[in-house]
Amino acid sequence: MDMQSIPGKVAFGEDRYNDPLRFLNGRFDCKVSAGDSNGALLIFDTFRDSIGGPPLHYHERQDEWFMVLEGDFLFQVGDTLLRLGPGDSIFGPRMVPHAFLNLVAPARMLIAFTPALDMEQFFRAGLGPGSAASEEFEKLHNAHHIFNVGPPLRVEQANV
C-alpha cells in the first residue's frame, strides 16, 4: 500500500491503518508509518493499560525517542535512571541499553524510531502480556536486531 498518497491526518485515538496493535502492556496506534517516510521514521502513540515495560535492551540499527503524554514513567538509558512525567522526553541512542516502566496505569507515551526500517513489523507481531520471558519474544527481538541485556525495571527502582 502506498501510504504517501493518502493525506497524513490521523485522529486522536486512531491508528494510521485503522488497525491498532497490542504489544506487551499496551495499545500502539501508528501515527507515522515507515511507508509514509520511506523507512526514515516510525511514530507510535502508546496507551499503557497496566503497569509494566520492556526488558533492558538495545537496538542495533535504530535510535529511539520517547515523550510522556500522561502518567509517570521510570527510564533507564545506559546507567542513568530518570523519572519522566507529562511533557518530558528522553532519547535512547542505538547501541545504548535502555528500558522504561510506566509506574501508573493508564499512561500514554509517544515513541519514535529512526530509521524505521522493520520496526513496524516487529510491533505488528502482537506479543501480549506475559510474553516477555518467552523464547518467541527473544527470537522476535533478535530477528529485528534488538538485543535484551537485562530484566525489566521494577517499581522499587523508582525512588530516584
Image (tube, rainbow, N blue to C red):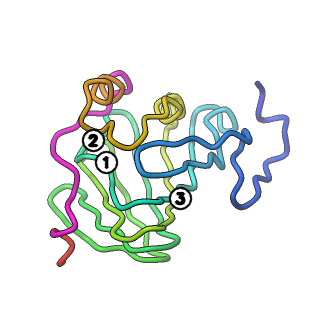
Mark 1 and mark 2: Cα distance apart in space: 11 Å
The residue drawn where x is 29% and y is 63% is 75
Residue 128 in percent (x, y) is at 43, 40
Residue 95 in percent (x, y) is at 26, 41
Residue 42 in percent (x, y) is at 56, 43
Q: Secondary structure at mark 3?
A: strand
Check disc 1 and report the residue beneath it: 54
The residue drawn where x is 58% and y is 32% is 39
Q: Secondary structure at mark 1?
A: loop
| Segment colored magenta | 143-156
Check disc 2 and report the residue beneath it: 58
Check disc 3 and report the residue beneath it: 47
As shown in the figure, which amino acid type bears the numbered disc 3? Phe
Mark 3 and mark 1: Cα distance apart in space: 14 Å
For the N terminus, which image quadrant?
A: top right
The mark that comes first in sequence, 3 or 2, is 3
Residue 142 in percent (x, y) is at 30, 25
As shown in the figure, which amino acid type bears the numbered disc 2? Tyr
41 or 81, nearer to the observer: 81
In magenta segment, residue 154: yes
Q: Secondary structure at mark 2?
A: strand
